[in-house]
């Protein structure tokens, strides 16, 4: 029997009631396919590759919350198309529909999500990374700032590298104030190996120096110089003759007198130049104190009337020609002692003490000494 007839169950058929039903026969739709109600749940939503997707142009076109469950695409072109809240797509990512929304499966481990706050194929400008004022200029072509250019304009160019090949004159003077360096040069004649600051090589107007607005001195009108020698000493010259020389050991040599007009400062030693020492055992025991000035506390042993005692002084600051000046500081009978200090050789001296009274004295006399540098010629 042919056609669409249905055999009764009694004749070995299924019967109309079993078409598309449980334990029955599946039926086809108008397209020759099973209806959705007759497909097993295990087959619904199976993953099916649909090809590649361009995340920049959204091709093929995908719509949020719309699709076939299990359909997925591989991203072939990175982009920022927004699909179901996701807008960061890299090559290799997977976009798959779960039946309700499109989901993203990252295809790159530890991927960078954004660059300078941007997504997708980012091309940075220098302003994006805080370098808006930076120019891609080679070092040799870099300009200097306006302030630096002004400062450079005040400097003399050195011929032949770092050495002056003669006096470089520039700057001006107004009255007695220094408005600029009048002459700065290298003197290869009488003072080979020195640089100098010269008020005027042949004569002219004097000028002065100021520090923080206060005048500290001036140069004379002719050949008055500061000379800086090759070992960083400093010399003040007048008329090409040294007047004050300060060497690298902090020693100052004066061509003329060194005087003070201060009513309170005077000329002498400052803190750090002095020291103290205590005489042990007896009044004849020697002492050591390597200072140019200081105090010696003598032993309190008895000194008979009219007796003289001498003790040695070891002092590296004492030259054989120096004077050792000694005075009675305290601790003894007023006017009871006569004192004398003397150098006995390089680094050595002696102090003599006499009891001028008519009786024996047992006192710890405190003596003050100072060294005055002296020479024989």
Image: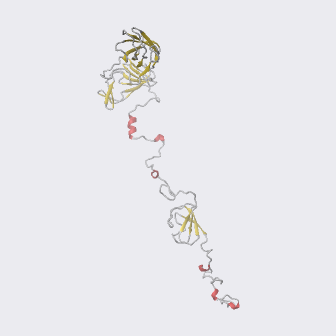
Q: Is residue 370 visible to the viewer in this orientation of the structure?
A: no
Say whether residue 256 is left or right of residue 28.
Answer: left
Q: Nearer the viewer, residue 285 or 217?
A: 285
Residue 287 position in % (x across, y down):
46, 17
Say whether residue 88 is left or right of residue 153.
Answer: right
Residue 98 position in % (x across, y down):
56, 70
Q: Quadrant of the C terminus?
A: top left
* Residue at 49% from the left image edge and 65% from the top image edge: 85
* Residue at 57% from the left image edge and 72% from the top image edge: 69
List the single residue furthest toward the front. 359
Residue 239 position in % (x across, y down):
36, 19
* Residue at 48% from the left image edge and 43% from the top image edge: 138
Residue 313: quarter of image? top left
Q: Nearer the viewer, residue 18 or 195?
A: 18
Up-down: is 148 above or below 226?
below
Up-down: is 71 above or below 329?
below
* Residue at 48% from the left image edge and 53% from the top image edge: 124
Q: Nearer the viewer, residue 308 or 215?
A: 308
Residue 243 position in % (x across, y down):
38, 19
Q: Quadrant of the N terminus?
A: bottom right
Q: Is residue 119 visible to the viewer in this orientation of the structure?
A: yes
- How many tags in the picture? 0
């Amino acid at each position: 029997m042919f056609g669409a007839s249905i055999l009764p169950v009694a004749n070995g058929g299924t019967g109309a009631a079993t078409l598309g039903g449980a334990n029955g026969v599946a039926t086809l739709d108008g397209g020759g396919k099973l209806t959705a109600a007759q497909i097993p749940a295990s087959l619904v939503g199976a993953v099916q590759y649909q090809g590649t997707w361009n995340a920049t142009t959204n091709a093929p076109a995908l719509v949020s919350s719309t699709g076939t469950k299990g359909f997925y695409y591989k991203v072939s072109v990175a982009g920022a198309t927004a699909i179901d809240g996701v807008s960061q797509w890299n090559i290799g990512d997977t976009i798959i529909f779960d039946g309700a929304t499109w989901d993203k499966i990252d295809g790159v481990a530890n991927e960078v999500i954004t660059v300078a706050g941007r997504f997708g194929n980012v091309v940075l400008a220098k302003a994006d990374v805080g370098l808006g004022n930076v120019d891609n200029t080679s070092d040799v072509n870099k300009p200097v700032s306006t302030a630096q250019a002004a400062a450079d304009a005040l400097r003399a160019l050195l011929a032949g590298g770092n050495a002056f090949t003669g006096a470089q004159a520039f700057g001006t003077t107004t009255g007695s104030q220094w408005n600029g360096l009048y002459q700065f040069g290298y003197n290869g004649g009488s003072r080979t190996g020195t640089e100098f600051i010269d008020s005027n090589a042949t004569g002219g107007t004097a000028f002065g120096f100021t520090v923080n607005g206060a005048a500290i001195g001036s140069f004379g009108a002719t050949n008055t110089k500061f000379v800086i020698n090759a070992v960083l000493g400093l010399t003040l010259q007048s008329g090409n003759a040294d007047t004050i020389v300060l060497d690298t050991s902090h020693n100052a040599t004066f061509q003329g007198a060194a005087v003070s007009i201060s009513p309170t400062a005077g000329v002498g030693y400052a803190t750090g130049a002095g020291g103290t020492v205590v005489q042990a055992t007896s009044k004849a025991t020697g002492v050591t104190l390597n200072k140019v000035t200081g105090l010696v506390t003598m032993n309190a042993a008895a000194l008979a009337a009219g007796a003289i005692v001498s003790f040695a002084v070891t002092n590296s600051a004492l030259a054989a020609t120096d004077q050792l000046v000694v005075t009675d500081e305290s601790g003894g009978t007023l006017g009871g002692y006569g004192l004398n200090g003397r150098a006995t050789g390089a680094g050595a001296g002696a102090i003599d003490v006499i009891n001028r009274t008519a009786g024996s004295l047992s006192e710890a006399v405190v003596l003050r000494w100072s060294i005055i540098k002296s020479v024989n010629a």
